[in-house]
Image (spheres, coloured by chain):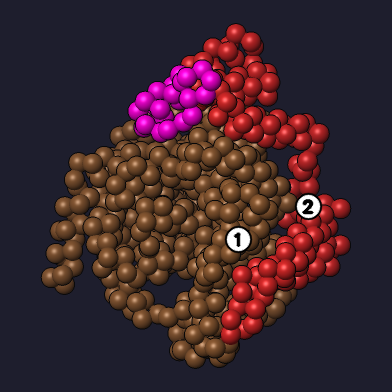
Chain colours: A brown, B red
């Protein structure tokens, strides 16, 4: 325990340094803004920031990127409540009761409980990381290539299972991501693959052009098709301090949402979309007045908002301890680590303690900053929504182009981004999820390297993959996950909305 | 057609890439070569595509819900215009430098795609380009090619 406090003290000494504090503020500020504005989500924004943060100190760069990620969760609820339009896919469920509360003149308490619920859940989630990550990282050091292959397989299956929509399409999307990850020099013998004689492809497909195209450009193309005019809430937002009754009604929901969100966030594929739905259905199931849900009950806002914020903290655990990204946004964070020459995973805590503890403690600070940004300044965020989209989209496209170009100062990356933008647009139109593609692309090289290492070490014996108890457990879980749809055929399975940016 | 075309395209891609991977060399199980991993990925992608093709005659509620909105002529035009504009930006960056490329790209977006009036389109393009130059080049010190115009 003494170690923990010493580490926290060390972490705060890093994250409260003026430069890192400014990075944290910038991150949560940009995160809130893009969360409020429908049309540019955290994945695309983090990808855009990737080249800009290259020149920064690694700790500050990761802090700013993480700030955008969890800041967007706060901002997403504002539009859900005031406009009935979720700023982020994770805030879809908040529209059900949040907007009804706003219609009844209770926009203030709804926004306030969102901010407080997010703050409490976010802080509890970071506390979870603080307590669990060091122990898990210590265990993860002992994990060899065959166990990692089994865990990665389980992760991919979870992503395919829970990415929303058709599973075969999600599987095709993931396999395409794997295929794209094989472009360039192979990770063991450095033989060029699929480079078609070009230097650009010999380096592999760039992460920034892929993600910016797939999420940023396609989002603009989809939004350009929507012609509906947004009706912005014009009334004065009153009662930004919840009443005692509001607190009494929402405190247990916030507690349950925090726990559900945190543990669901750890699982790959869950992202931040599924936990709010689970929290909402849990609240409705245990409520004494379930029929009131959807008419403006505060528990219906508090639980899901707590769940999506603690899920962001939970999703950092696999990254910090195993180096596995459980969602597309965390995949961008992985790329940020790698860009700065830092390998996320079990050795992060011992090799780069300043980055690990600095980033973890910055999340406490970031949650406090978000509370300050989101409560007193809610009117400013609401006004941001009055900027017409026709003035925004060319700027978003320009930022996308700059983001894709400046990673390696190569104009071909801008063309690649346009191609991936078209691919992303087609995938959205045809209901092929993008998150499995990005996750498979990011983890594909690691997966290939570990598969080949395992086979070489075991001299071609496939038994190596099931020889270790952890690997066996992961394969059993994978088998259950594969067979689950066949057993559930005919029964009603839970349905979550198709992913947008998760 | 809408349901069968994407998996058919994926099948074609997987077969082509699988052939390239095979030519790279698969090696053996105890010594996999560079083509080993991509070949089996292509095999998986081909199998999934075949399954999707086999399933395509069955109605899918997800597709029904979005069937109205898919690929209109106006949509095609807009998508191609945005793609052309973005590609133009990439091509012009090296030739004309950041500021001029940004101005041309912005003007293309606002005048050609968004159909703003000429004066307004040029004005906001100039303001947006200057703002982007100040932010990225001056404040964030991101390196861009100077181009023929020298900035």
State yes or no: residue A136 in magenta.
no
Mark 2 Cα within 10 Å, few/some/many (few <14, many 20+)?
Answer: few
Residue under the image location 71 percent in, 75 percent down: A489
Q: Which residue is mark 2?
A: B64
Q: Where does residue A348 sit, x and y in percent of width and height?
A: 31, 65
Position of B47 relative to A23 (above/below): below
Q: Where does residue A98 sit, x and y in percent of width and height?
A: 47, 45
Mark 1 Cα within 10 Å, few/some/many (few <14, many 20+)?
Answer: many
Location of the N terminus of chain A by quadrant is bottom left
Residue under the image location 43 percent in, 45 percent down: A50
Q: Which residue is mark 1?
A: A192
Q: Which residues are magenta?
A: B130-151
Q: Give the secondary structure at mark 1.
A: strand
User: Does the rendering let one see residue A145?
Assistant: yes
User: Does the rendering let one see residue A64?
Assistant: no
Q: Where does residue A291 sit, x and y in percent of width and height?
A: 54, 57
Left or right, residue A417 beside residue B149: right
Left or right, residue B57 beside residue A281: right
Q: Identify the subunit bearing mark 2.
A: B
Q: Give the secondary structure at mark 2.
A: helix
Q: CA distance from mark 2 to mark 1?
A: 43 Å
Residue under the image location 38 percent in, 62 percent down: A343
- Residue in front for this viewpoint, A301 or A452: A452
Position of A99 relative to A262 (above/below): above
- Residue in front for this viewpoint, A421 or A104: A421
Q: Quadrant of residue A451?
A: bottom right
Position of A108 relative to A229 (above/below): below
Q: Identify the subunit bearing mark 1.
A: A
- Residue in front for this viewpoint, A159 or B80: B80
Q: Where does residue A353 sit, x and y in percent of width and height?
A: 24, 62
Q: Are marks 2 and 1 in contact (CB under 8 Å)?
A: no
């Amino acid at each position: 325990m003494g170690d923990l406090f010493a580490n926290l003290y060390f972490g705060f000494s890093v994250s409260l340094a003026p430069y890192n504090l400014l990075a944290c503020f910038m991150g949560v500020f940009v995160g809130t803004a893009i969360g409020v504005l429908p049309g540019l989500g955290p994945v695309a924004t983090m990808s855009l920031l990737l080249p800009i943060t290259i020149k920064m100190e690694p700790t500050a760069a990761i802090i700013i990127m993480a700030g955008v990620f969890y800041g967007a969760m706060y901002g997403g609820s504002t539009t859900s409540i005031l406009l009935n339009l979720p700023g982020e896919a994770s805030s879809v469920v908040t529209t059900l009761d949040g907007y009804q509360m706003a219609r009844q003149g209770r926009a203030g308490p709804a926004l306030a409980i969102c901010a407080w619920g997010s703050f409490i859940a976010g802080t509890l989630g970071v506390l979870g990381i603080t307590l669990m990550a060091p122990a898990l990282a210590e265990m993860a050091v002992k994990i060899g290539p065959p166990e990692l292959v089994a865990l990665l397989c389980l992760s991919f299956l979870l992503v395919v299972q829970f990415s929303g929509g058709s599973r075969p399409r999600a599987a095709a999307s993931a396999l395409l991501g794997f295929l794209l990850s094989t472009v360039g020099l192979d990770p063991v013998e450095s033989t060029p693959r699929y480079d078609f004689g070009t230097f650009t492809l010999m380096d592999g497909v760039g992460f920034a052009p892929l993600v910016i195209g797939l999420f940023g450009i396609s989002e603009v193309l989809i939004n350009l098709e929507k012609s509906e005019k947004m009706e912005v809430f014009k009334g004065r937002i009153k009662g930004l301090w919840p009443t005692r009754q509001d607190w009494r009604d929402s405190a247990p929901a916030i507690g349950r949402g925090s726990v559900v969100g945190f543990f669901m966030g750890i699982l790959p594929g869950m992202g931040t979309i599924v936990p709010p739905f689970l929290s909402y259905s849990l609240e409705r199931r245990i409520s004494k007045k379930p029929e009131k849900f959807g008419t403006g009950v505060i528990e219906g806002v508090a639980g899901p908002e707590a769940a999506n914020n603690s899920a962001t903290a939970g999703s950092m655990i696999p990254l910090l301890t195993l180096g596995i990204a459980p969602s597309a946004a965390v995949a961008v964070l992985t790329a940020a680590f790698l860009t700065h020459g830092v390998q996320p995973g079990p050795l992060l805590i011992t090799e780069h303690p300043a980055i690990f503890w600095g980033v973890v403690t910055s999340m406490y600070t970031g949650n406090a900053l978000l509370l300050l940004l989101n409560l007193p300044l809610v009117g400013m965020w609401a006004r941001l929504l009055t900027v017409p989209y026709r003035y925004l989209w060319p700027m978003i496209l320009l930022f996308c182009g700059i983001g894709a170009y400046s990673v390696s100062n190569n104009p071909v990356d801008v063309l690649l981004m346009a191609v991936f933008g078209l691919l992303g647009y087609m995938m959205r139109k045809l209901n092929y999820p993008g998150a499995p593609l990005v996750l498979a692309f990011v983890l594909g090289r690691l997966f290939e390297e570990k598969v080949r290492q395992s086979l070489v070490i075991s001299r071609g014996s496939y038994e190596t993959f099931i020889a270790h108890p952890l690997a066996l457990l992961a394969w059993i879980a994978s088998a259950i996950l594969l067979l689950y749809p066949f057993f559930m055929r005919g029964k009603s399975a839970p349905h979550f909305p198709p992913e947008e940016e998760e | 057609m809408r349901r069968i075309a994407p998996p058919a395209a994926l099948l074609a891609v997987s077969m082509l890439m699988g052939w390239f991977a095979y030519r790279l060399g698969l090696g053996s199980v105890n010594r996999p070569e560079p083509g080993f991993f991509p070949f089996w990925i292509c095999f998986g992608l081909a199998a999934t595509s075949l399954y999707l093709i086999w399933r395509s005659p069955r109605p899918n509620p997800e597709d029904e819900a979005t069937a109205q909105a898919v690929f209109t002529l106006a949509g095609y035009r807009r998508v191609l215009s945005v793609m052309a504009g973005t590609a133009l930006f990439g091509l012009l960056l090296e030739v004309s430098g950041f500021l001029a490329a940004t101005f041309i790209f912005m003007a293309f977006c606002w005048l050609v795609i968004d159909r703003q009036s000429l004066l307004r389109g040029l004005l906001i393009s100039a303001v947006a380009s200057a703002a982007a130059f100040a932010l990225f080049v001056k404040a964030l010190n991101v390196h861009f090619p100077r181009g023929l115009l020298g900035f």
